[in-house]
Structure formats: C-alpha cells, structure tokens
Image: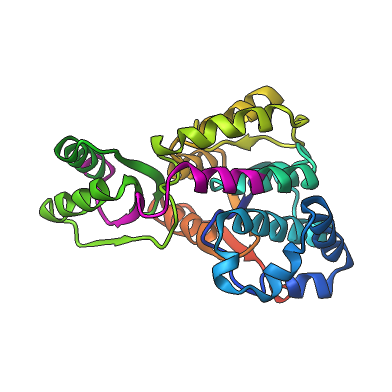
Amino acid sequence: MTKVAWLFPGQGSQAVGMGITFAQAFPAADKVLKSADEALGFALSKVMAEGPEETLKLTEHTQPAILTHSTMVVEACSAKLPKPDYVAGHSLGEYSALVAAGSIAHADAVRAVRERGRSMQEAVPVGIGAMAAIIGMAVSDVEAGCQEAAKATGKIVVPANYNGAGQVVIAGHIEAVDAAIEVLKAKGGRKMMKLPVSAPFHSPLMEPAQKVMEPVLKALKFKAPVCPLINNVDAVPVIDPEIICQGLIRQIPGAVRWEAIMKYLLSQDVTTFIELGPGKVLSGIASRMAKEAGIEVRAVSIGNPEDVI
C-alpha cells in the first residue's frame, strides 16, 4: 500500500509577499497569520507582505515567517489533501512538521523559532562563519575535504546538510570553508558556491545557541504527533514527545540528514510527497532521488492558492 509524506521547507525559501495570497484566499490561513502577530507581539504579517527583503532575511524574522506560511497552507488545505503517514521538515521545517502533526501549538512554535533564529545569529558574529553548497561530489570526498581543511587551518568546517541528489552543504569558520572549497576543487569538484547566509548553521559553532534553546524547548508542551516525524538528526521515525524535544535540541549544532530521511521514506513505500510552504526545493529533491532509485512518485508543492487546484 502506497503512503504519503508531508514535507516542510527550511530557511532560504522565504520571499517578500510570502503567504499573503493564502491569507486573502482562505480565512483559516488569515487566522494563522493573525495569531502569529499576536504570539510574537509585532506585525510579522507586515514583514512577510512588505519586507523589505533585508528585514525578512534576518534569521529571527525568516524562521517564524516560513513556519507561519507552512502552517497557513496546512490549515487552509489539510481537508483537501491525503492525510500523511509521515511528516518531515528540513531544519526549521521540523517545527512546521510538528505543528502540522499536532505535536505542538503554532503559537508556541512561532515564539520558539524566533528565539532559535535570534540565538543562532548571536552565536557567531557576522563575518566569522560561512556555508557553501558542494554539488556533484561523493559524500565521502566532501567529508574528507572538510577534515583536510580543518586540519590545515586549525578551524572548524563540517558537512551541515546532507541534502541528497548530489548536494552537500558545509559550514564553519569562513577561513576553513574557503580552504575546503579549494581542497575540493583540487579533488575534481566543479560546482560549489558560498551561500548568502548570516551564520554557519548546523555546525559546532552553533553550540552557544543550543545552550540558549535547551531550556526554551524543554519548557514547551509537546504531544505525540498524529503520525511519525522522521527527525533531522537520526533520520528515524519518532513519536515520543521527549525524544522529539531532544532531537530539536541536538539539531541546532547537528547535521541535517535529509538524504537519509528521503531514503527512509522511499523504503517505506511513500509514493506521494507534498511540500507545504514556500518554495519547491524538497519536492524537487524527492523527485530526483526517486528517479535515481527507479521509483515512480508524485511530488508536488503547495505554496500559493493556485497550487491547490
């Protein structure tokens, strides 16, 4: 029997105007947007609608904006969609997945991810860290390149996102990231790019943010989700609230194992992937990985009202 997975995007999928057409088209979505403003005590809706882009790109705004957009789509469309057998979210998207699965209230999650964004930004001063996407290289080569660069510079650089479909994102001190790029070029790497982010997310440099977020997350009231979450740090199904909370804590300096998550879902006969929220990155990865595995799937994204049709 075929199964369904709902996927939730992470940081980088934001854009000025995000979610606003959903709020205009669906009263349930507008209610979510207004509840986010109330929970945060400022007009996140205005930042989402009008920007400017530099304001929306601030991590403390980006994270609640993406979570809120995803939740708006869920509230507007869930009755029209096949129910999920699994949920999963990329980094920040794990919070969206937990809201969709009834494990945590949106108001609590949106406050938590704003603090998460703030603490992650403050963990490393601007200009100290960097991230880069490495395309088309074997994971083992990327890992070896990071180790070589770290040893040469005495700084930190590690794989941060194992995204699948031939993409690994590395993160760490800017000197070590630059050194890793040069090492990987020497190993035959042809496509790699520095990412326009403000901090080296999912690396050991995020440990100060982990310390800030641990009591915040432990104070939240998690419930067992209505279906298993495939979490970022272990890429295994979890339903126990305590394990869910610990996974979110460990996720902050830990790598996102998205490739392993997708392989698990494909192994469990998931053939329908629905990405809910801004962007089409995750549905695209699902399509490419399924094709590589010789599995026929349906992967769609819902970020605007016309996508519902």
Which quadrant: the C terminus? Answer: bottom right
* Segment tinted magenta in the rendering: 113-141
Q: Position of residue 94 (x, y in %)?
A: 61, 43
Please say whether residue 133 is one of the residues in the magenta stretch.
yes
Q: Is residue 286 above or below residue 101?
A: below
Q: Nearer the viewer, residue 197 or 128?
A: 128
Q: Quadrant of residue 108?
A: top right
Which quadrant: the N terminus? Answer: top right
Please say whether residue 185 is one of the residues in the magenta stretch.
no
Q: Is residue 288 left or right of residue 118?
A: left
Q: Position of residue 260 (x, y in %)?
A: 45, 39
Q: Is residue 145 left or right of residue 79?
A: left
Count of all numbered marks drawn on residues in the image: 0
Q: How is the image coloured?
A: rainbow
Q: Position of residue 285 (x, y in %)?
A: 46, 57
Residue at position x 84%, y 66% in the image? 30
Whether residue 309 is visible, yes or no, is no
Q: Nearer the viewer, residue 230 or 104?
A: 104
Whether residue 227 is visible, yes or no, is yes
Q: Quadrant of residue 239?
A: top right
Q: Is residue 183 left or right of residue 200?
A: left
**Residue farthest to the left, as pictured:** 186
Q: Is residue 207 above or below residue 68?
A: above
Residue at position x 16%, y 54% in the image? 182
